[in-house]
Amino acid sequence: MTPDYPATTHHLAGLATLESTVEIAARALVATHPDICRVCRPGEPAVVTTARVLVDDCERLLAALDDYRSHLVAHLPKNPDHPIQLDWPF
C-alpha cells in the first residue's frame, strides 16, 4: 500500500521539525557542557555524565528519524512536478 502523498509530505515536515529540535538540543548540551566531548573520567560531575548520555541518545534518535524518513520517501510516488526536498536548509 502506498502512503497518501499529501499526508506523507506533512508527516515529513513534522519529522524535519523534530529532527531540527533534537539537533538544537544536542548542540546546546555540547555548548553548555564542553567536557562531554572528552573521555569520561572518574569523579566527574553527574551533570556532565547525564549530558553525555543525552547527546548519545540524541544521535541515536537522529539516526532513527533519518531511517524512518528514508522509508517514507521510498514509498512516495516518483513525480517530477513535486520534487521532494531531502536536505533541510537549517
Image: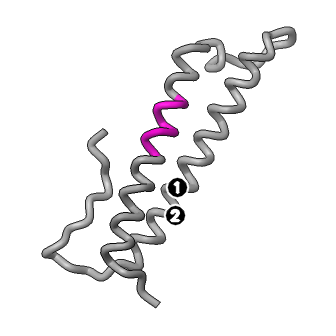
Q: Residue at x 35, y 78 (%)?
A: 76
In this figure, which residue is indicated by the disc labeled 1?
65
Circle 1/circle 2 CB separation < 8 Å = yes
Q: Residue furthest left?
A: 81
Q: Nearer the viewer, residue 7 or 90?
A: 7
Q: Secondary structure at mark 1?
A: helix
User: Which quarter of the rendered picture does the C terminus lie within?
Assistant: top left
* Residue type beneath disc 1: Leu
Circle number at residue 55: none
* 22 versus 40 height, above or below: below
- What is the magenta range? 19-26
Magenta stretch, main secondary structure class: helix
In this figure, which residue is indicated by the disc labeled 2?
68
Q: Nearer the viewer, residue 28 or 40?
A: 28
Q: Residue at x 32, y 57 (%)?
A: 86
* Residue type beneath disc 2: Tyr
Q: Residue at x 52, y 39 (%)?
A: 22
Q: Secondary structure at mark 2?
A: helix
Q: Quadrant of residue 32?
A: top right
Label 2 environment density (alpha carbons within 10 Å; few <14, some 14–19, many ≥20): some
Q: Nearer the viewer, residue 52 or 13?
A: 13
- Left or right of 24: which side holds 60? right
**Separation of disc 1 and disc 2 at Cα?**
5 Å
Does 21 lie within the magenta span?
A: yes
Q: Position of residue 52 (x, y in %)?
A: 69, 26
Does 10 lie within the magenta span?
A: no
Q: Quadrant of residue 48?
A: top right
Question: In this figure, what is the number of numbered marks?
Answer: 2
Q: Position of residue 14 (x, y in %)?
A: 42, 55
* 1 versus 28 height, above or below: below
Colour mode of the rendering: one colour
